[in-house]
Image: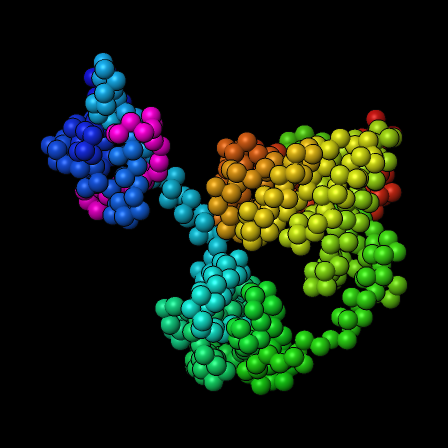
Amino acid sequence: FRAVFNRAAIGIARIDLAGQIIEANPALQRMLGYSAEELTHNPLATFVHPDYVREGRLAQLTELSEGNRHELQQELRYVHKLGGLVWCNSIASLVRGPSNEPLFLIVMTEDITARKKQEIALEHLALHDGLTDLPNRTLMFDRLRQAILASKREHHPLALLMMDLDRFKEINDTFGHHGGDDVLRHVSTRLKGQLRESDTVARLGGDEFAIILPGVVDEGAAGATAARILQALQEPLLIDDESLEIRASVGIALFPRHAEDADILLRRADAAMYEAKRAGAGIAFYTLEHEVDSSSLTLTFELRRAIEENALILHYQPVLRCGTSEVIGVEALVRWPHPRHGLLAPDRFIPLAEQSRLIRPLGRRVIEAAVQQQDRWWRVGITLRMAVNLSIRNLQDPELLPCVTRVLEMYTVPPDWLTVEITESTLMADAEETLKVLAPLKAMGVRVSIDDFGTGFSSLTNLKRLPIDELKIDKTFVTDMPSKKKDGLIVRSTIDLAHALGLVAVAEGVEEASTWAMLSAQGCDLAQGYYLCRPLPAAEFVRWYQARSPKAA
């Protein structure tokens, strides 16, 4: 024991039953920066970060020393002698004497600081805008939800401001993208200068910003903040030695007056912002008139009829194995051949379906049509996996599980050749409710994929306990891999994370040969994107597939 104790690369300490350090090996001394004399005869709690002590992490050692458990594994933060933080994985074991009496604890400690710093940096990259370092849309939406929950608890309102810069395209055209980026950075700085510590300002993309104002009681207070922001933006800005005055349009929606959940509040602030831009008013508050859109109502009615008449169609995008280019499956993507508007992509009608609850019957139709097509292909020797997308409202559909059961009984395709994809934001919305639906799907044999991974804020705990088979890396990171080092780092780390959890790593958004090569080199399992093949109608896909795979013909 003594040789191992002294030569081990990991920190080892003997702790008495009262929590005092009896002795510490050289590795632990180096890890924490203290000598053996400074460590011994002091409580272990002396060297652990106070937050962890307050959380009761070390209190669990008492259970161990009393013999109520055999081993304790936990993550701890120690404080280095020089003041830095040391992240560690600690495993504590109880050592007993000849009569089974508790003698002391052995605590083995592995330094994971470098890994934790990388995780924190990656999390920051995933949740912040790369240009301005402001929170991005994902983090903003999470904070908006949290702010609404706090407002409900404390019975105080809040305001949401949506802001869009006026004539920003002209700024880009005049000064180039470099000048446009400078403007966005200056705008971000000025926005932060006008807000309180408790407020949140986020860049949602392009020249669009969102501002969350907790505790703003009425339109007057919200309007005053908006006016102050616009005035600050109008202060002359020097870009390429030219003076520039920035103008913007701001839409304001109040909780709970205009909406009682984050989605609707965001939509209504957005509607108000477009009204401010249309009217040239600078600032506009949400009113019911902003929501009235007869064309949307007409399209919703037509969508209902299209679902009932089975008029929607599916296109199929191939999924290829990295390294070998073998086609292993397809993702089913819904399209609407509209009699007047032509072939409509999902972004034209899925939001309407979500708002009107048509998403439930639409989702069931897609599952039925996708598995039926998969079965047809299997019968002629085209054995491919099929993936379908489900939203949070699909998971809330009481008819979903009976639909999947019925479809799998109707056709000969094995259940584990069907994959359901849910977005990371769906997982974040309510992990417990999601589990209630995914567990029976998994019990049937259906595979589960987390789509758009990297855009949300899901915890490793959820990834471990949910019945997930694959992580699908969001295309916003994959597409820019060749040109943006940070995106490449996020993709590589996500691949490693998937493999560490025993999951398949899938990249979407492969649009260049260089991206495809990088993914293969980094050990990604599967990929899809326009460089490999765009989504195709069934007949066109078969021709493409048979041209690549003569044996399938």
Pick the front one: 354 or 170: 354
- In this rendering, the answer to whether 160 lies above or below 509 is below
Q: Is residue 541 above or below residue 97?
A: below
Q: How is the image coloured?
A: rainbow
**Is-magenta flag for residue 78?**
yes
Q: Which residues are magenta?
A: 65-88
Q: Quadrant of residue 235?
A: bottom left
Tell me what residue is drawn at x 65 percent, y 36 percent: 442
- Please report the residue visible at 77 percent of the width from the left and 49 percent of the height from the top: 364
Could you tell me which residue is drawn at 50 percent across and 51 percent down?
Answer: 457
Q: Image quadrant for the C terminus?
A: top right
In which quadrant is the N terminus drawn?
top left
Q: Is residue 304 left or right of residue 96?
A: right
Camera-side residue: 209 or 488?
209
Counting from the top left corner in percent of width and height, residue 27 is at 24, 28
Q: Is residue 496 above or below residue 458?
A: above
